[in-house]
Amino acid sequence: MEVGLIHIYCGDGKGKTTAAMGLGMRASGNNLKVLLTQFLKSNKTGELNSIEKLKEYYHFVPGVPVNKFSWNMTEEEKANAKVEHTKRFKEITKKAVLENYDLLILDELIGTVNLDFVPLDLVLDFLKNKPKGLEVVMTGRDPKEELVNIADYVSEIKAVKHPFKKGIPSRKGIEI
């Protein structure tokens, strides 16, 4: 790509990951190379099943599954997540650069930064020095001001209503 821009999909509403992965599908449908990783997630979603079918252009790098919310983690689990997430961020950004990807999707990176599982300075350094043609997408709630300032697109998805508040759990094929 001639000019790669930086996107943030944020907010408390449903659809941040879906928007990011949809952009990945659009890019791969146009023969662009897409690299995706998910932080703070279990690696078991319908989107990932679909991406597997597009593997010629759309590549997923799994991490150690996170099967509980951060507020339910022990201090040891948080320390382990920080080590794994920081290492994976460094590895995936290096891969994106060395293997000349067109689009890098860092799903839930914003939450990971907010928890200090990946240092903000590390992310900002990468974004400031990324290859000119690399498009980068980050998702998550409450992006830090520094991330908003460096981004070219910031789209906020707002929850007006959500069935979780009625006690309806995530449903396969819709939320997961």
Image (cartoon, helix red, strand yellow):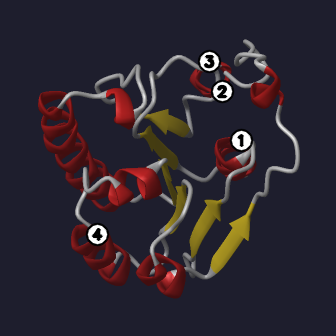
**Residue closer to the observer: 31 or 172:** 172
Image quadrant in which the N terminus is located:
bottom right
Dots 4, 2 in contact, CB < 8 A: no
Residue tagged 1: 18
**N-term-proximal mark, 1 vs 3:** 1
Q: Specify few, some or many for label 3: CA neighbours under 10 Å numbering under 14, 14-19, or 20 or more.
A: few
Left/right of residue 12 with respect to residue 113 in the rendered view: right
Dots 4, 1 in contact, CB < 8 A: no
Image quadrant in which the C terminus is located:
top right
Q: Which secondary structure lies at badge 1?
A: helix
Left/right of residue 107 with respect to residue 22 in the rendered view: left
**N-term-proximal mark, 4 vs 2:** 2
Left/right of residue 90 with respect to residue 8 in the rendered view: left
Q: Which secondary structure lies at badge 2?
A: helix
Dots 2, 3 in contact, CB < 8 A: yes
Eye-nearest disc, 3 or 4? 4
Eye-nearest disc, 4 or 2? 4
Dots 1, 2 in contact, CB < 8 A: yes
Dots 1, 3 in contact, CB < 8 A: no
**N-term-proximal mark, 4 vs 1:** 1
Which residue sits at x=45%, y=58%?
Answer: 110
Which residue sits at x=45%, y=38%?
Answer: 38
Q: CA distance from mark 1 to mark 3?
A: 13 Å
Placement of 23 over or under 49, stated as above or below? below
- To which quarter of the image does residue 76 belong? top left
**Identity, as a three-letter code, of the amino acid under mark 1:** Thr
Residue tagged 2: 47
Q: CA distance from mark 2 to mark 3?
A: 5 Å
Residue tagged 4: 120
Residue tagged 3: 49
